[in-house]
Amino acid sequence: MKKFSRILALLMCLAMMLSVVVISGQAADTDVADVAADADVADDGAEVDAAQTGADQIIIHVDSPNKTPYIYYWNALPTNKETAYPGEKMSSDAIASQHGGNWYTYTFSNTSKINFLLTDGTTDKSGQISGELTRTSGEWWYTKEGRFKKKNPYIPDDYTCVDMRQDSIYFVITTRFYDGDTGNNVHCWDDASANNPDSDPAWRGDFKGLADKLDYIKALGFSAVWITPVVENASGYDYHGYHALNFSKVDARYESDNFTYEDLIAAAHEKDMKIIQDVVWNHTGNFGESNIEPLFTKDDSDRTKLGDMQATMIPTKRLLDYCGLTKAEDYWKLSPATQHDKRLQLMKQTQGFTDMVSYDNTFDPNNYYHNGYFGTNYNWDDYTCKFHQIAGDCVDLNTENKAVADYTLEAYGRYLDMGVDSFRVDTVRHISRLSLNKWYNDRINAAAKAAGNNNFYMFGEICCRVNEIWNRNTFTESVPYYTWDDSATDLAKLSDNTDPDSIKANLQNSIAYNKANIDVGKCPTSSNAILNGINYHTPDYSKSSGMGPIDFCMHWNFDTASAAFGVGQAEDQYINDSTWNVVYVQSHDYGCDGDHFSKTACGTQSWAEKLNLMFTFRGIPCLYYGDEVEFQKGVRIDKGTEITLADSGRAYFGDHIEGTVNTTDFSQYSNATGEMGTTLNKTLPKHIQKLNAIRRAVPALQMGQYTTNSNYVSGGMSFVRRYQGSYTDHKGTKNVDSLACVAISGGATFKNIPNGTYVDAVTGAKKTVTNGTLSVESTGQGNMRVYVLENSSSTVHGAIGPSGQAYLK
């Protein structure tokens, strides 16, 4: 079993691969002490956690390559203890160092919290080698890069990251899922406008809460958790994470003193589950970006104050000078509209500006943003969307500038190092495909492999708000477009130079390229998802972009399962390999009924049928949190501060999962208590548990190609799926020949299939095929049959998953 090692060498690899340039002369170097004090990065599950070391013990390890560190400490709890500066000499730790590094250790007994800093033993302040640090009970590893981890980072993780198609995805808005630490609850600055009460602040759920409920998600049978962006944010309503202030830093409002992002990743891996991180390359928020356009310093040392904008957002000298001010308090006396305009003017030239780039030393001097709006001819659904900002809080990054791509990749490389398994890429359709293929996709995938993850996967939000395959009858604005690579000749049109003239030429070439590829006839075709007759064939990825899509075509047609099934088949020839499509009924943005801005109220039986299709047809099934109980059905998903979060499709879900559960495997659990027990025993959760169990047992339903050709199948929503080849899961690698005949709701006849015994994974019924024909009776909406060929590699010999189903029976 290949070990997935979170090696810090990844960043060195990225530096060599990307030839990273320093983005801004104004961007301050990351201070080691600040990074640690902010706890913006920490690591995996505790090697010796508080339960093992004792709730009143703190062990500090320090990796110090060139000097013996001293530890100066004060303000201990529960009983104060302190030492004189420069502190006490730490002990060399040969046992820890045998795995790598040069470790020193100090133990605080009978201590639950301690303030300290590290020195080199000299008596003056020049010997200080860290800033002020704070830790609580447990064992902590402080790396030479200035990061706290809860495990020796030189000891590899034995978690195996499998092919993402073997997973099913549960999608959460972290702040709205479960509150594991009330101490980091905080209002957004605009919570009052939305009338969100103190009992339901926008920042409520957190990493600790999500980790606490991983067993719930695993009990449903999901093996991957997609979370909204984790990076530091700043805006009036930023609880969702899409308004970045610092790409390279985790927002403190998600973390707890003793539980960080890396702890969440480790907790998931310990349960053989993945973390999919939502990433944004298209834009930042309008308060600048700390390493691109630093307009503010954010003080997050006290999480409880983060709901106070003026107390925690400190304007930089650059911003104050531009406003003609000397004091921060004077900036806050400006009208909100003036504050916003001043920020935006520094980030990008906006007034009376029609050129593509800035030649000005004041306004976006390095062209990190798309300047101007290219006149007023802006349309959400044509090529101009790639060079304009989509909203006031989403300031469009200049992805035709290699320096922006390099910084973005360097920043997100930190999360690969932490062990993130996958990226969901936001607003992909608003980025030029040339830029993605030249500077992003291949390099991110290569960096993940360098970290030991050969199954890293990226999928993008190519948001098309139409029911048809072709968005406004254009290739460049449609889902299939972004699944394809560009030719070397076309990629060469973009210069790596970062001077304004080169960036302007890049923009002109990107615009010309988009215009030249509008014709849908320019789309290549593929049979990667389709069986060759009844046989699996090796897919051709030579022209793949390296990024899969969210299946907006099916999503937008999920008013009924049959409509989604129809468009799915129609679009597959145009997508490089639709077995990688991420398929959902609805999300935190859009539903599938009526105007698409409200959550579906289709009813339980219709939901069951839609889920049956999602879990058996090609693609990776994904469920938005709460849909397992039709949470907030029929309500508006999002309307900003015009409605309370409690009245939206982004309401807090934690009340439905209070309690505990003993999860022994995916879809297998016992002793579910409280509201969680009630939730898990409802109709759709039981349905999802069985669907997940069936899908996990049948490789054909995960990675298989399919056919609906009349030579092999006839009937409504019916198809054959087959996978033949090497298959690796958490138990090891084997060769399989997995074939499944699926009939959803209606009856079907399967023809010219291999003879043998077929077992229905739903009921356990067996049918013997001697003449290549298998007939399946109509089961009714919400039910289906999944007949699996019984052979030496099949594990399906009877009914799969829990019994007592309302529909799968």
Image: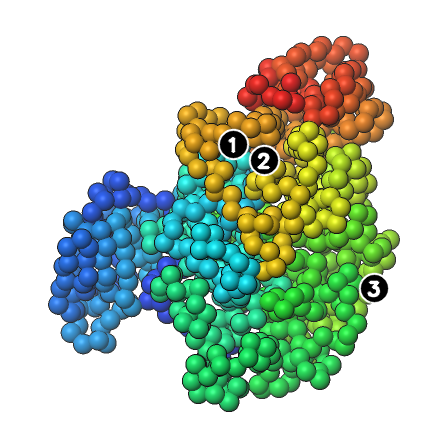
Q: Residue at x 70, y 69 (%)?
A: 387
Residue at x 76%, y 77% (from the top left corner)? 375
**Mark 2 sits on what residue?**
628
SS assignment at label 2: helix
Query: Disc 1 residue type?
Result: Thr
Q: On the picture, is 616 further left or further right than 246?
A: right
Above or below: residue 188 compared with residue 140: below
Residue type at tag 2: Glu
Pointer 3 local density, CA inside 10 Å: few below 14, some 14–19, many at least 20: few
Which residue is at the front of the view, 318 or 164? 318
**Residue 682 in view in this figure:** yes
Residue 258 placement, left or right of 165:
left
Of pointers 3 and 1, the one earlier in the residue sequence: 3
On the image, the x and y values in percent for residue 96 come to 26, 49
Towards the viewer: 629 or 129: 629
Against 694, residue 342 (above or below) is below
Q: Secondary structure beneath disc 3? A: helix
Q: Are marks 1 and 2 in contact (CB under 8 Å)?
A: yes
Tell me which corner region of the image, top left, top right, bottom left or bottom right, holds residue 710.
top right
Where, by quadrant of the figure, is residue 366 drawn? bottom right
Q: Residues within 10 Å of mark 1 (few under 14, many from 20)?
A: many
Q: Which numbered disc covers residue 516? A: 3
> CA separation, marks 3 and 1?
52 Å
What is the number of the mark on residue 175? none
Q: Residue at x 40, y 46 (%)?
A: 180
Residue under label 1, please give it: 679
Q: Residue at x 23, y 47 (%)?
A: 95
Q: Earlier in the sequence, mark 1 or mark 2?
A: 2
User: Is residue 792 in view?
Assistant: no
